[in-house]
Image (cartoon, rainbow, N blue to C red):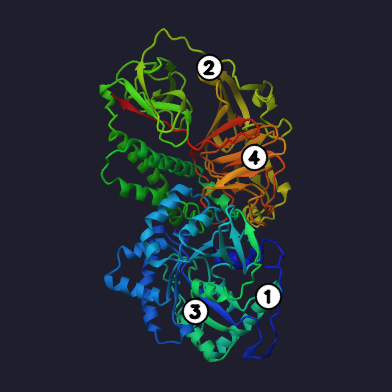
Amino acid sequence: MNRRNWIRNNALLTGGITLSPLGLNQVIGKENNRGQAKTEIKEIHIINLSHTDFGYTDLPSTTWQIHVNNIPLVLQYCEETKDYPQEAKFRWTMESLWILERFWNQATRVQKDKFDKLVAEGRIEVTAMPGNLTCLMDEYEFNNELNRLGSFYEKYKPKVAMQNDVNGFSLGLIQSLNNLGVQHFVSGCNGYSGGVPLPAPSFLWWQNSKNQKLLVYNGEGYPNGYDYFHKEHFRRGPVPHRYDIWYNQPTGNEIFSNKRNDILKSFDILKGKLEQLSNQGYPFPYLQLSFTNHLTIDNDIPCRQLSEFIKTWNEMGLQPKLVLSTPSQFFEKINKVLPSDLTSLKGEWCDWWADGVASTPVELAVLQEAKRRNKDIGSALEWLKPDVPGLPERLNSLNHDLVFSAEHTWGAYDSVAHPYDERTLGNHLQKFDYFFRSNENSKLIKADIIKASGSYKPFSLTNKIEVFNPGKTERIGWVEISATAMRFEANGAKDLLTGEFFKFEEILGSEWGSRDGASVPPPEIPNDVWPYHPAKYKFFVKGLKPGQKKKFELVNNRAYTPKSLEASKFFDVVVDNSSKAIVDIKYKPQNKSVFDIDSPYLPGQLIMERPQGKFPREAIANRSLDSKNILHSTPKVVDFKKESSDYCLRYKSVMEEDFAKRIEQQWDVFDDSPRIEITTTIWMKENLEPMASYLAFPFSLQTPRAFYKSLGEEVEVGVDQMPNTCAEYNTIQTGVSFKGGDMNIALSTPDLPMGIFDGLVRGKRRVTFKPQTAHFYNMVFENYWITNFAILRPAKIVARHIIQCGQPGENLEPVENTEIWAYPTM
């Protein structure tokens, strides 16, 4: 985070809340002479760390080098200060376990022995988090990553987890960290465009529904320890490139000077800060302050000057005493004075920064696909038991890449201001390499598992296929097979057990080596290279049990007459011919409308949001934009038609909007399953202006309750969420469940894990609330961040949604995965 933004927005640290941290009062005494200030704070524990922000200040590849090279410096500084007073000995906190792992893979035996000795002496603390992570993590790969790092957890047994910068944390973290033996959590939320449940600094118990808990030090921002002793920043200008020779690290007495006169100036600054804490009501004798060095602040080197500064400060007899410390040493002190009735808060710590990931919708969809397949691979191994050499190592690598993809850095600090600079482009390539690499590797592993399963036969030698449900729940979905690889004529698949025939539907593609081109090609871009032809065939199957296999013969059934479905057993579709749109769908078993006809938006309608005025991105980031300066619009429908299908009622529309070359939407309303699938395809142009887009799902339910999953933990919106945390949007992963007095509805959002409940509210600092309607707006994309996140680029966005309806009391979960494995067989 840019230092300038830290200071300018320091007032946002409490999210505009005036609560006292614990409902307690504290008085810090006035000084009776310059060297002695009577204060309830007896010790200030300074935590020196380097905040891991892969790619924010430098390319991720450079960031790795910086952090790994820091550890030998720490070893050196610890050696240099070994004879200092205990409080001034150099100490270091490892914020990220990934850095230690990378160091360990290249360190010498001497370095490893020194590191372990310093850990044993309390000079270095290894904390429990792999890195600073967003709420995008899935519990499956996250827990697998913790297992992969198990040797470090077993060796160092960390009792403290630390996460900085990010403004929120997944609820499932509590159980995952408790399972590792972690008891304490240090939060250093960034006050810029965010807030915390209680004013910082404060303490609280963070609990989940199982009453598992972590003792949280809700600290100020991770670099704010600097501000307690300095009035001015060391660095002038923007975050420099590491190779910029005109910028240098603070040296000598430029910061944390050990000159007596400079220390007295720092003492006066500290007194002012302690008075602020007095007004806020901080009641404890110990205070923890985090500090990062002051050239880049993020990804910076250790600060050697701290030891000299603290040594001299304490020799001068100034109070409070300063201690160069670690989080565990601080908790050892503070635990002795914490009250038994410490504030306890239960629920999701909703992230004020969560929307930033939506600036890369295509990359995000690729990541979500890889996560789903990774979980399928895990269960498929139990069913198929293939012998694939080197598979454990490949799975570990895949899991790691998926978790590292959730690391909170989404671009260089100046990526929006300078969208075409080398740092921006290089960061984007290196960051999202993890996303695409994960998806590619998951497909390669899947192929190797299938080939080693014993059922596979080369497609050139067979006309039979096997379909397989690799998941742990019953699966309904489309089976896709290659049309271009087929060496025989076929128009469908015959179930070899029942004899039932399933007619193919075509998926057209523009590919080299085509046969006859299609007469009406879809609007792919570019579309003038190769003719269009069937690239794949698909047919719909249902009721596949977990691990179940079915065999089909691909046949050319010339006598088959298409069904051309005209009605659904479960749904009546209400179409308004004048607006060329679906305006409602009736759920027949309940004789209820699925959608709220009084909503300002139609079902599945695409909404464009464009902030207006001067510096609108900054106004939205500061949550101060007048709603009158936000324009909402919807695309123009230029074509709407009903198409024939054996499997569903199908409706297609084509839309126009300035931000896109073309927009298409397809509704598949199924006959013998209470299920609706919606696919929205957007061929997006480049967009530099601030803009967001949503898909509207205004469901009609009586007394609705809304639920989503957070790292595997169920969260009821407005009930299982921390007070004063973000309610402008939420990370909902694979979907949302709505429970109502008249009907239950589950909405799957496999490609788009962000959404807004109740109404479109941006830039208004809406804190946690309980929705009054079942209206939901799935975020397609946005580029509002003024720093960190990339601009919107030309792309083809494909957003899929699945709606399931059920009776009140029926346990409906969002469909997490519809992929059915299909492969040629003997």
Question: Residue at the spot x=42%, y=15% of the render?
Answer: 501
Q: Is residue 664 visible?
A: no
Which residue matches tag 2?
Answer: 644
Left or right, 737 with respect to 758, comes to left
Circle 1 residues within 10 Å: few <14, some 14–19, many ≥20: few
Of 133 and 113, nearer the camera is 113
Q: Amino acid at mark 4?
A: Phe
In contact (CB < 8 Å): disc 4 and disc 1 = no
Left or right, 300 with respect to 670, comes to left
Which residue matches tag 1?
Answer: 276
Coordinates of residue 108 in the picture (x, y in percent): 28, 69
In contact (CB < 8 Å): disc 4 and disc 3 = no
Which residue matches tag 4?
Answer: 776
Query: Counting residues from the N terminus, which is met first, the one under dot 4 or under dot 2?
Result: 2
| Front label number (4 vs 2) | 4
Real-space Cα separation, disc 4 to disc 3, in angstroms: 49 Å
Coordinates of residue 606 in the picture (x, y in percent): 61, 35
Real-space Cα separation, disc 4 to disc 2, in angstroms: 30 Å
Query: Counting residues from the N terminus, which is met first, the one under dot 3 or under dot 2?
Result: 3
Which residue matches tag 3?
Answer: 324
Position above or below: 44 against 71: below
Q: Quadrant of residue 346?
A: bottom right
Real-space Cα separation, disc 4 to disc 1, in angstroms: 41 Å
Of 203 and 212, nearer the camera is 212
Q: Label 3's element? A: strand
